[in-house]
Image (cartoon, rainbow, N blue to C red):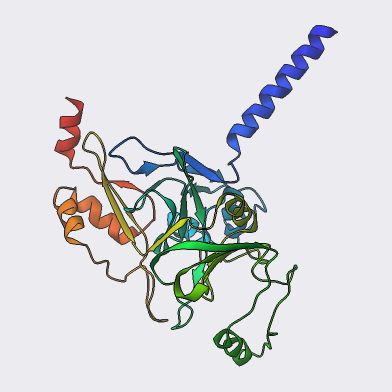
Amino acid sequence: MMTQRLTYWLTLLALVATVAMTLPARANTWPLPPAGSRLVGENRFHVVENDGGSLEAIAKKYNVGFLALLQANPGVDPYVPRAGSVLTIPLQSLLPDAPREGLVINLAELRLYYYPPGQNNVTVYPIGIGQLGGDTLTPTMVTTVSDKRANPTWTPTANIRARYKAQGIELPAVVPAGPDNPMGHHAIRLAAYGGVYLLHGTNADFGIGMRVSSGCIRLRDGDIEALFREIAPGTKVNIINTPIKVSEEPGGKRLVEIHQPLSKNIDDDPQTLPIVLTPAMQAFKAGANSQVMERAMEARAGMPVDVTLPHAVAQQTL
């Protein structure tokens, strides 16, 4: 009897361990790559079950952005993904070309990279950013965290109140903390522009990984809570807008990661907007497989693509 019980518990523990390994962590934290590399993370795959939920529900499960999941799986129905279809979960990325310090936010890829001080890892969070419009765009900037508050109130600006009023919604001068507050339960204020831009949570179940805010950086409530615990005033914040990232990895492998550029006008198609290559990226392209890189620039799937020339691969294996 004792042997049977021991076998039972060992089997149960093995099953729990196996399930735990297959479930994604709430925060996607990865060890920093070796010197000269920018590649972090690992893509996963998800088999859509019957009544498996919307693409937004799947994105939330793996803590990726909605548009990132949609771009990685072109043609999938965002509302009712077909049961049995296999989705790519885009968890692999190239680190942005910016100092690995504090918070690095790349608007074009709708991601935030957090480099905790004294640790050799990076945590990647999906974000929502400002909508199209003159006063709702999220600007690029280099700044610091000036303040952070739990259970914040929301004081909508005059422009925000006017925009809502045009839609028939009368906003109060101050929205108190609570379940109806669109800032969620935590807010981190940035020093630039007089402190009008914040990283904050949300009381909505959608919009992460999309352009939905009035200019602030929006995170899922669990993510902003985790950042809130770790971030201190004075932390550096670098907000960039880079739709294309490249890396020549140790050993000569060339990788490119291309995202849809941010639209500037309502009629823009981000899938066909031109992507301007810097001189450094032009030089990278000259040493890459041009056909594969052109296909990657057309697909704009938001995941690293190997564009190494075939003869370079052969040289690496010698």
User: Is residue 149 positioned above or below 15 on the image?
Assistant: below
At 44% from the left edge and 37% from the top edge, which residue is drawn? 120
Residue 251 placed where, x, y %? 23, 33
Question: Do we see residue 239 in this rendering?
Answer: yes
User: Is residue 100 positioned above or below 31 on the image?
Assistant: below
Instruction: Look at the image and tell me in which quarter the C terminus lies.
Output: top left
In the displayed structure image, the side of residue 235 where residue 278 appears, left or right = left
Residue 37 placed where, x, y %? 31, 40
The image quarter containing residue 262 is bottom left
Residue 162 placed where, x, y %? 59, 90
Question: Do we see residue 78 in this rendering?
Answer: no
At 57% from the left edge and 66% from the top edge, which residue is drawn? 207
Residue 184 placed where, x, y %? 67, 65
Spot the residue most to the right: 1
Front in this rendered view, residue 136 or 98: 98
At 22% from the left edge and 42% from the top edge, which residue is drawn? 308
User: Is residue 87 positioned above or below 34 on the image?
Assistant: below
In the displayed structure image, the side of residue 269 where residue 206 appears, left or right = right
Front in this rendered view, residue 82 or 134: 134
The image quarter containing residue 213 is bottom right
Front in this rendered view, residue 110 or 4: 110
Labels in figure, total: 0
Instruction: Look at the image and tell me in which quarter the N terminus lies.
Output: top right
In the displayed structure image, the side of residue 210 where residue 165 appears, left or right = right
In the displayed structure image, the side of residue 290 where residue 222 appears, left or right = right
